[in-house]
Image (tube, helix red, strand yellow):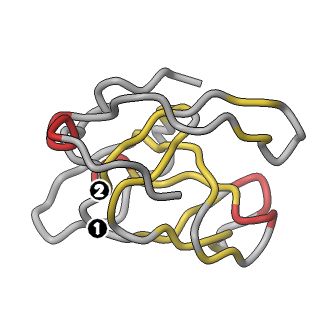
Amino acid sequence: MVGTQSASAASGCYGSGPRVRDGNGNLQYTRYCYAYLKSNMYDWRYGASPTAIMEAGESWFVCQSYFPGHENPWTGNDRRNYWWLWSQGDTKWSHNGWGWFPANRISGAGTGAAPGLRVC
């Protein structure tokens, strides 16, 4: 899932990623974003267990959504965030690794949405 590193990585999502088929078989456009921390990914439709792990680095994401009932896990710098990014993880456990990645681990997101990525 790694793309070409860009100076834009520090300020949000950028460039065009691959076109991928999501867990429902729909063809999706993606953009690259830089994750500065790895994280578990979740799809709450299937319970609280993680569906995958996404490693730190440059990866593609489809879109992002705001889930007020699902706070991002703490990063150690107390940045509360309720935005999550939809993608397929690197280490897949269930649902072919599709799940939500916490926005507070994306460069440029901080406590809000990841700049440059569409809302689902």
Q: Callout 2 environment at 10 Å: few (<14), some (14 to 19), or many (20+)?
A: many
45 on left or right of 53: right
Q: Is residue 107 left or right of residue 99?
A: left
Amino acid carrying mark 2 in the image = Arg
Which quarter of the image is occupied by the C terminus? top right
Q: CA distance from mark 1 to mark 2?
A: 6 Å
Give the answer, above or below, for where 51 lies relative to 15: below
The residue nearer to you, when weighing 114 against 30, is 30
Q: Position of residue 65 (x, y in %)?
A: 52, 32
Type of the residue with mark 1? Leu
Q: Quadrant of residue 86?
A: top right
Q: Which residue is depicted at the point 55% across and 63% down? A: 41
Secondary structure beneath disc 2? helix
CB under 8 Å between discs 1 and 2 = yes
Name the residue at the right extreme: 25
Query: Mark 1 sits on what residue?
Result: 37
Q: Residue at x 50, y 45 (%)?
A: 60
Q: Is residue 39 above or below residue 14?
A: below
Q: Residue at x 57, y 70 (%)?
A: 90
Residue ranking furthest to the left: 77
Classify residue 89 as left or right of residue 25.
Answer: left
Nearer-N-terminus badge (1/2): 1
Q: Nearer the viewer, residue 47 or 25?
A: 25
* Residue 105 badge: 2
Disc 1: CA contacts within 10 A as few (<14), some (14-19) or many (>=20): some
Q: Position of residue 79 (x, y in %)?
A: 17, 53
